[in-house]
Image (spheres, rainbow, N blue to C red):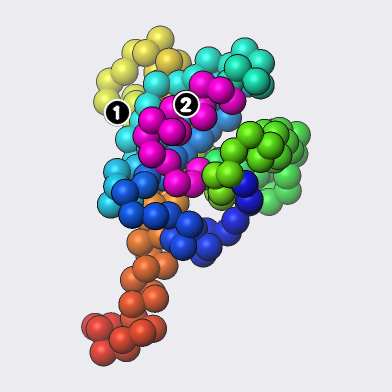
Amino acid sequence: MAVITIEQLPARLANGTTLAGLDLGDKTIGVAVSDRGFSFAHPRPVIMRRKFSLDAAVLLALLKKENVGAVAIGLPINMDGSEGPRAQKSRAFVRNMAQLSDLPFVFWDERLSTVAAERTLIEMDFSRAKRAGKIDSAAAAFILQGVLDRLQSLDAAARTESDPSSAA
């Protein structure tokens, strides 16, 4: 397993694989998975956290079932750009996963992802109780969709560079 950059991600995604997004919470792990065309993020049920070995086993089984080729994980950076204890927890989680899996991980700045996810759930008229059970997976989908959108913009830029006449 390696931590890679967003620019390295396309080369690591084989045909037929998907991309997963994770939002690590203290009590849950929010999970979302892309379609095979890397266009849309689809939330999956949250993983209730117990202890790392159990959480990792459940997560790895889900990633295998979904044919995941790489994982984007939200990195909770402070609004001033610094990394606090939550960012360090995310980095430690990835270091621990490295010992169990060869999947590459990409860190993605998740500032305000939970806020955006909660606003979306409110707009969808979810009650406070239902939002609590879905917020981490919705945040994971928000994180993953950001990564997917960035991959599409990188792909468009690469096509423009290789064929300048296609830029209109």
Q: Which residues are magenta?
A: 56-71
Residue 109 visible to the viewer: no
The x, y position of residue 122, in whole percent, is: 34, 24
Labels 1 and 2 touching (C-beta < 8 A): no
Residue 84, quarter of the rendered image: top right
Mark 2 sits on what residue? 61
Q: Earlier in the sequence, mark 1 or mark 2?
A: 2
- Residue at point 65%, 44% (across, down): 77
Q: Is residue 137 left or right of residue 60?
A: left
Residue 61 included in the magenta stretch of the image: yes
Residue 108 visible to the viewer: yes
Q: Amino acid at mark 1?
A: Glu
Where 155 falls versus 16 (above or below)? Answer: below
The x, y position of residue 88, in whole percent, is: 74, 38
- Residue at point 32%, 35% (across, down): 42
The C terminus: image quadrant: bottom left
Where 78 falls versus 117 (above or below)? Answer: below
Spatial CA distance of label 1 from label 2 is 33 Å
Where 131 falls versus 63 (above or below)? Answer: above
- Residue at point 54%, 44% (across, down): 103
* Crowd around label 2: few <14 · some 14–19 · many ≥20 (10 Å): few
Mark 1 sits on what residue? 123
Q: Main secondary structure of the magenta part?
A: helix
Q: Is residue 115 left or right of residue 77?
A: left
Q: Nearer the viewer, residue 34 or 78?
A: 34
The x, y position of residue 96, in whole percent, is: 70, 34
Residue 24 included in the magenta stretch of the image: no
Task: Name the disc covering residue 37, or none.
Answer: none
Element on which disc 1 rests: helix
Element on which disc 2 rests: helix
